[in-house]
Image (cartoon, rainbow, N blue to C red):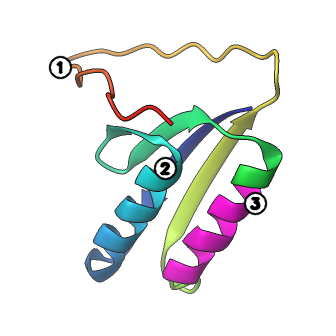
């Protein structure tokens, strides 16, 4: 399934959540990641992320698109180079 992750965390946890997200997804923009994950990978990712977060302050949004659904991304303004660290 296609997954988009957006996070907002306290500064002291930014680097930890960034490293965790990079293990599973492509870094698209500051606190935005996207990529393909299986159900099992998504469960492992969720467990890894929750271990880093302060659930009373931090927030992570995860958008999932079922297999066969094709999300369309529109970019305006300066673009980021394509990721080279494909899973």
Q: Is residue 8 left or right of residue 63?
A: left
Name the residue carrying label 1: 78
Name the residue carrying label 3: 43
Name the residue carrying label 2: 6
Is residue 41 at least partly visible in the picture? Answer: yes
Q: Which mark is residue 28?
A: none
Of badges 3 and 1, the one in the foreground is 3
Q: Position of residue 52 (x, y in %)?
A: 50, 80
Residue 65 drawn above or below residue 42: above
Image quadrant of residue 71?
top right
Q: Position of residue 86 (x, y in %)?
A: 44, 31
Q: Is residue 83 left or right of residue 1?
A: left
Q: Nearer the viewer, residue 82 or 56?
A: 82
Q: Magenta residues, as a range?
A: 42-52
Q: Earlier in the sequence, mark 1 or mark 2?
A: 2
Q: Is residue 53 left or right of residue 10?
A: right
**Mark 1 and mark 2: Cα distance apart in space:** 19 Å
Which residue appears at 56% of the width and 86% of the height? 56
Of badges 3 and 2, the one in the foreground is 3
Q: Earlier in the sequence, mark 3 or mark 2?
A: 2
């Amino acid at each position: 399934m296609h997954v988009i992750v957006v996070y907002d965390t306290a500064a002291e946890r930014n680097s930890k959540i960034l490293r965790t997200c990079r293990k599973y997804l492509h870094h698209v923009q500051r606190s935005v990641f996207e990529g393909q994950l299986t159900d099992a990978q998504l469960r492992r990712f969720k467990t890894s992320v929750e271990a880093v977060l302060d659930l009373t302050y931090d927030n992570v949004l995860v958008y999932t698109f079922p297999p066969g659904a094709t999300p369309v991304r529109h970019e305006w303004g300066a673009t980021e180079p394509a990721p080279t660290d494909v899973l």
